[in-house]
Amino acid sequence: MLGLGIIGWIIVGGLAGWIGSKMMGTSEQQGILLNIVVGVVGGLLGGFLLNLIGVDVKGGGLIFSFFTCLLGAVILLFVVKKVRT
């Protein structure tokens, strides 16, 4: 995801954060800015976790980056929901 640039991070992260919040049922509590933050942080988290299990995340491309962000966003939202309750 590092090769996307800042605009790519915002677009892919925002879309992944929005879809992740819809999947986890938290979209009513978040705005667009929080969706972007969740997606970008989720991308970092997803990339870190995939790298730990041996997946090469650097040469994945745009679609792989999106799914990495989505995976990380869902994991992040799951953890946040568990901490809040």
Image (cartoon, grey):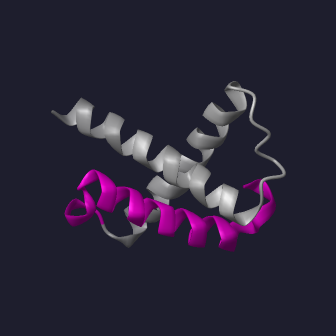
- Classify residue 64 as left or right of residue 3: left
Tell me the residue at 66%/41% (across/down).
47
Residue 5 against residue 72 in the figure, above or below: below
Compared with 18, 78 (above or below) is: above
State which quadrant residue 28 falls in.
bottom left
Is residue 68 highlighted in magenta?
Answer: no
x 44%, y 60%: residue: 17
The extreme left residue here reads: 85
In the image, 50: left or right of 41? right
Vertically, is 20 above or below 57?
below
Furthest-right residue in this view: 59
As drawn, the residue found furthest toward the top would be 53
Q: How many marks?
A: 0
What span is colored magenta in the figure? Answer: 1-30
Q: Considering the image in quadrants, where does the C terminus appear?
A: top left
Name the quadrant containing residue 21: bottom left
Q: Residue 11: image x %, image y %?
A: 58, 73
Q: Quadrant of residue 51?
A: top right
- Dominant secondary structure of the residues highlighted in magenta in the image: helix
> Is 24 covered by the magenta stretch?
yes
Q: Residue at x 50, y 57 (%)?
A: 39
- In front: 85, or 51? 51
Q: Residue at x 66, y 35 (%)?
A: 50
Between 5 and 62, the one nearer to me in the picture: 62
Query: At which x and y percent is residue 1?
Result: 72, 55
Q: Is residue 82 left or right of residue 12?
A: left
Residue 72 in the image: x percent, y percent?
51, 44
